[in-house]
Image (spheres, rainbow, N blue to C red):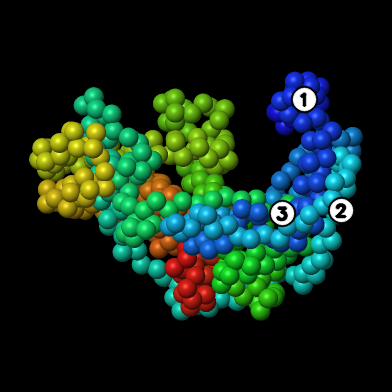
Amino acid sequence: MRHLTGSFQVINILNRFGHCASHSTLLELETAMCDSVVECSTNLPSAALAYPKITHFCWDNFDLTEETIDGSGTTHSTHGIMIQEIKEGNMEKIMEQPTVKTGKTKKRSATFKPHQIQPCYATGKAEPSLTVSTTTVENDQERQLHQENFLWVFCRMKLNSGGELFPGWKGWLSSTTPSPQNVNETNMSSIVEYMPVINAPITEAATVQRVLQISLEASQELGQPYTFVTFDLAVAKKAYDIVWQNPQVYKTVIIHLGVFHTIMSYLGALGKLLHGSGFEEIVTEARLCAHGSMDRVMSGKNYNRAMRVHVTVLEALERLLFAKFEQDRDSKLSKDLMTFMTMKELTNEMSSSTAKKILQSGVYAELFSQYEAFKENVRSGKYGKTAQYWIQYMDRVWLLLQFVQATKTNNFSLHVFCLKDLCPLLFTMNHQNYARYLSVYYVSLANLSLSHPGAEELL
């Protein structure tokens, strides 16, 4: 009630009716809990699991730009979370934490004790030290993914035009993604706990060094051989410098680039590619996005709106392309496929087994093969430069959706494959920071089994 209202009068009124403690008692209790947490030296949250499958750390800045006279004195701190994937039947095994007993005092406010952060003396940008045996990762799932994507487009095109409602791409992915092969992992979930707050801006090298030390020590307390830490690019650049300058100290640390910010950068590069193509006019005239919001869509700053626009335009282009395919080929395979697929299965009982049954049918395989051959002709310029330009755009949006799919389904091999294909457009559109560091990140993950044996099985 105190946190909901912030009023000591309300607390005291409830206290007089016998419903809660007094306001002063609440302040004493909160102060005692705060002092107990501060005096506890562990780096782990109180509810950390002792034997999780994997523990992952994510850190970012927390800024409150309060209104001050000269602009100084605003709040800039560093917050982190710990994500633990739960093993089957391991929910109750909470890590034993040291407790600090405090006597009863009359203190009603905590005394702030600033943490002494060890200075970081960077000697300039360091060169990456990578264990490299390959720079190419083949994706054996690529054809299957193209088949699944085409099935979604085909169902949307045929069923929605017939009055049935078929889910969008996210709904399709949720309903058709198969369960894990391991039965024990079917109901696997994760817990999220907060790491200790560092009262310093994360833009400083000393703060990043402290973050790496806390994450490393926490992993060691849990008995995890490797430390997985995720940053956005601005922080990752500093973290990479620290790790590369101290390879022996941080040899078990694996830095990940955040997927969200990577996608935003790629959306910005895609917006540059579309500049002057008429894309903005198409979107605004179709009322997919207001004219005043197009700048943030094209720059990738508004993630949700940009993804909605690109997926909608992608589907529209696929429909136009398939209509041209049917016109040129005069094929009856699409009608045969609609006869094979029952409406009930697709609209009410769509699942991974239903999708697998359709994907393995001969009529679908033949239709997909012919359509892919048609698209290759479009890519080669047989139908003109305009069609060639727009199918290149479609391929890039499909790549983006595969990257999202890899994250949602925890498909590590697909994630690494997509990273490689994201880099060329980032280089072309002059997104140099992401292009350079994403290349290094891709090579490190592609050779993870050599540099960090056993880490790939945890991810």
Report x, y in % for residue 42.
71, 61
The residue under the point 34% across, 60% down is 182
- Local packing at callout 3 (Cα closer than 10 Å; few below 14, some 14-19, many 20+) is some
- On the rendered structure, is 292 left or right of 244? left
Disc number placed over residue 322 in the picture, else none: none
Q: Is residue 263 above or below residue 117?
A: above
Q: Mark 3 or 2 closer to N-term?
A: 2
The residue under the point 43% across, 50% down is 408
Disc number placed over residue 15 in the picture, else none: 1
Separation of residues labelled 3 and 2 (CA atoms): 14 Å
Report x, y in % for residue 375.
26, 50
Q: Secondary structure at mark 2?
A: loop
Separation of residues labelled 3 and 1 (CA atoms): 33 Å
Disc number placed over residue 196 in the picture, else none: 3
Position of the N terminus, as image quadrant, is top right
Report x, y in % for residue 160.
26, 29
Residues marked 3 and 2 touching at CB (< 8 Å): no
Disc number placed over residue 113 in the picture, else none: 2
Instruction: Give the label, 3 or 1, closer to the camera.
Output: 1
The residue nearer to you, when weighing 182 against 428, is 182
- Local packing at callout 1 (Cα closer than 10 Å; few below 14, some 14-19, many 20+) is some
The residue nearer to you, when weighing 63 against 30, is 30
Q: Secondary structure at mark 1?
A: helix
Q: Mark 2 or 1 closer to N-term?
A: 1
Separation of residues labelled 2 and 1 (CA atoms): 33 Å
Q: Is residue 289 above or below residue 176?
A: above
Three-letter code for the amino acid on which mark 3 is drawn = Pro
The residue under the point 38% across, 40% down is 170
Q: Is residue 399 visible?
A: no
Residue pushed farthest front? 18
